[in-house]
Image (spheres, rainbow, N blue to C red):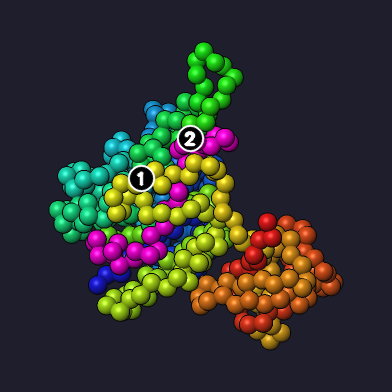
Amino acid sequence: MKKVELLAPAGSLEKLEMALVYGADAVYMGGEAYGLRAYAENFSREEMKAGIEFAHSMGKKVYITMNIIPHNNDLVGMPEYIKEIEDMGADAIILSDPGVLSLVRDFAPTMDIHLSTQANNTNWASAKFWYDHGVRRIILARELSLKEISEIREKTPDDLELEIFVHGAMCISYSGRCLLSSYMAGRDSNRGLCAHPCRWKYYLVEEKRPGEYMPVYENERGTFIFNSKDLCMIEHIPEMIQAGVTSFKIEGRMKSSYYVATIVKAYREAIDKYYSDPEGYKFDSYWLEELCKASHREYYTGFYFGKPSGEAQIYDKSSYIREYDFVGLVMDYDKKTGIATVEQRNRMYVGEEIEVLRPKGRYFTQVIKSMKNAEGEDIDVAPHPQMTVLMPMDEEVEKYTILRRKSSD
């Protein structure tokens, strides 16, 4: 049985490293142009090259997003950019436009091509059409059920890979084809500039009664009528694998390094547990508990088991659930002394309890017994962003280990 791929977002070089160290088989990332996350940190040419080299050193893959809906001026310089990506050794380009597809085939003929969810692929005939035009992976629309996905698998060539989303934010518009952002904020989401108006609060105003704001839903604070819950399929690993897909995709190139590591690790453990004993596999609630320690909206299963009802929307708020703070990242560890060199990410204090999340194995809890600054001076608090802190650890840790604490909010 070929193991399903776990594919993670990489919004920056650090996020790429965290995703791969915590168990992703591949990452997808964007350069400074042609992707749909213009407000993510994204990658310079040098960072892209470094990220690809890091991934390949671990035997893992990197896919580059070029999935904008391009206008004429967007095509200027695109052939040269495609060649650069090929020269860097990227494993695939993710695209959604037939014109971009033709350019990739002309200027990087050996490059694997993945069709973005922006192309709205919802049926087997469309999948075969793209396959016949050189696409080797279809990132299926989020609006499909597992039954529909199974049928697509049955009616398409065996070597056509299918990728599905398993976790992250859901878009109110059909597979991300959003016009609301352009209308409300003058920012084209199909060209990477989404203002996320689906998360805003809305009221109804009657034409002849200006200034009277009536709630769209029965709530005096108004409502977030487009605000979807987050997708979470951690409890349904067997069903998704049995649908015949190639890759499980996690959404979130604009999320934090802590978010990426936490989500990836939980899915990695669940997937590995399934393949170790498919017949005896049992879901472990620990994995869901871990997912809830990353910033998220309420979870649901999207379209996989039928079209969502009104319960799939969050009508009273657009804020995330944030129960844990990312306070530090281990950059080095001395096995002889048991001292970790930590880069501070949020203010932390001597005497407070933290959880220590390592790339492999379950977290452990300890109290911060002491801290020193980079000059070796004792300190009671680490207040400065990204300052270097030295602290003793109760158990052995490694680079990329995460320190977190339960939020006091």
Residue 391 appears anywhere in the view: no
Left/right of residue 82 with respect to residue 406 in the rendered view: left
Outermost residue toward the left?
155
Image position of 61 (left or right of 343): left
The quadrant in which residue 401 appears is bottom right
Q: How many marks?
A: 2
Q: Position of residue 367 (x, y in %)?
A: 71, 76
Q: Which residue is mark 1?
A: 309
Tell me, for residue 337, which label it has, or none: none
263 vs 355: above or below: above
Residue identifier under label 2: 217
In screen coordinates, is 388 left or right of 179?
right
Q: Nearer the viewer, residue 387 or 147?
A: 147
Quarter that holds the N terminus: bottom left
Q: Helix or strand or loop: what does disc 2 sit on?
A: loop
Query: Which one is earlier in the sequence, the residue at label 2 or at label 1?
Result: 2
- Residue situated in front as seen by the camera: 395 or 39: 395
Q: Amino acid at mark 2?
A: Tyr
Position in image of residue 113 (x %, y %): 30, 49
Nearer mark to the viewer, of 2 and 1: 2
Magenta residue check for 219: yes
Image location (x, y in percent) of residue 65:
41, 47
Q: Is residue 22 magenta?
A: no
Q: What residue lies at 29% left-to-right and 54% top-to-bottom?
A: 305
Residue at 54% over, 15% down: 209
Label 1, residues with CA under 10 Å away: few <14, some 14-19, many ≥20: few
User: From the viewer's perspective, is residue 304 above or below residue 73?
Assistant: below
- What span is colored magenta in the figure? 218-244
Kindly report the distance in space between the C-alpha atoms of the residues bearing marks 2 and 1.
Answer: 15 Å
Residue 228: where, in percent of width, then height? 44, 45
**Quarter of the picture holding the C terminus:** bottom right
